[in-house]
Amino acid sequence: MQETPLCLRVGHFLSYAMSYLNTTNFTNPSTFILLGIPGLEAAHIWISIPFCAMYAIAILGNFTILFIVKREPILHGPMYYFLCMLAVTDLVMSTSTLPKMLSIFWFNSREISFSACLTQMYFVLSFSGMESGILVAMAFDRYIAICHPLRHSTILTKSVVAKIGLAVVLRSGILALPYPFLTRRWPYCRTNIIPHFYCGHMAVVKLACTDIRISSYYGLFNLFSVMGMDVVFIAVSYTQILQAIFRLPTKDARLKTFGTCISHLCAISALYVPDFLSSLIQRFGHNVPLHFLVLITSLYQLVPPVLHPIIYGVRTKQIRGRLLQLLTHKGT
């Protein structure tokens, strides 16, 4: 018996879902249906290959950083503690969305319960905020290390690092709470089909049949006041750092010191550029193709967890050296 092609089964499923929803009204859907990347359903299998490879790299790379820092006492310092926080955040961020995306691409598993949808939304928003806060902490660490090197160990003690980490977690966790609470209170009487691969905040609330300006305004407030403040703080820190670098006596010293900041600047760009683009396009880019918006969002979900281990692992001399020692020792 010949098997029906995947793209035809997806088309039949969506046609059935749409016809069902056109004749059914509901205010609290028990499940949502994720479409993956709308318009590119026929290419989902092929798209899943690089996505799966990037997810594997993110998992392996971030666990490697955690393992090396835990194993080597010489790496037990503020910079590496912040790097471990970033690795944990990346692992949670990518695992919150990528397994479900791959299950959509591979097994056509599109349903997600309303509660699971809100939980996924909360994890993505809170941990993206944590990632931003950790990058601010790392910028502060670079500022102290370069501008006040003799006071670095007395300013950034283990207790201070722990308090900074706790403040980052509490800030992000609390500020992300209104998103699922506001989303839960809206009535949904149009459709429960989400044109996305995960339960993004705006992708879900746009399905509500009521005025959602409160959700939209709070999202913009969070984006510009919290992450905007983080960007300003990072910019001020690196302005001071660059001034200190240019005051160094030799060109080699300036290049060496600036090289330690390049990795952090790359990580900052990988996080903030796709995040700001996707947030603004979802609210104001009404003529932007939907599949383009979803792909931009996937960059925000995938690229930082993949790049951070490469940037900090390969470019950081201490981690690179310990990794090479570990591999050489195992090889012998």
Image (spheres, rainbow, N blue to C red):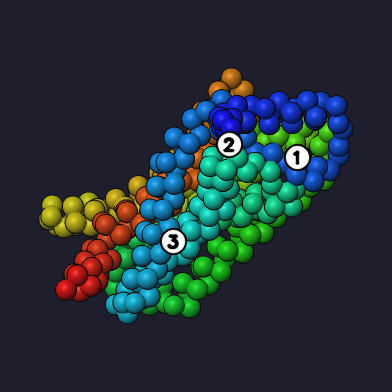
- Helix, strand or loop for disc 3: helix
Q: Which mark is first along the chain, 2 or 3?
A: 2
Residue at 46% over, 52% down: 233
Foreground residue among 232 and 80:
80
Residue lying at the far top of the rendered structure: 287
Residue 169 in the image, given as x and y percentages of width and height: 58, 63
Q: What residue type is labelled 2?
A: Gly
Q: Are marks 1 and 2 in contact (CB under 8 Å)?
A: no
Residue at 64% over, 27% down: 11
Circle 3 Cα neighbour tier, 10 Å, few/some/many (<14 / 14–19 / ≥20): many
Residue 110 in the image, given as x and y percentages of width and height: 65, 41
Q: Nearer the viewer, mark 1 or mark 2?
A: 2
Foreground residue among 221 and 131:
131
Residue 89 in the image, given as x and y percentages of width and height: 50, 59
Q: Is residue 55 above or below residue 38?
A: below
Q: Which mark is first along the chain, 1 or 3?
A: 3
Circle 2 Cα neighbour tier, 10 Å, few/some/many (<14 / 14–19 / ≥20): many
Residue at 87% over, 32% down: 25
Q: Is residue 136 visible?
A: no
Residue 208 in the image, given as x and y percentages of width and height: 78, 35
Q: Which amino acid does label 1 sit on?
A: Ile
Identify the residue position indicated by label 2 in the image.
36
Identify the residue position indicated by label 1 in the image.
214
Q: What residue type is labelled 3?
A: Ala
How many circles with numbers are drawn on the protein? Answer: 3
Is 145 on the left-hand or right-hand side of 160?
left
Is 322 on the left-hand or right-hand side of 64?
left
Is 143 on the left-hand or right-hand side of 183?
left
Which label belongs to residue 87? 3
Is 321 on the left-hand or right-hand side of 182?
left
- Helix, strand or loop for disc 2: loop
Q: Are marks 3 and 1 in contact (CB under 8 Å)?
A: no
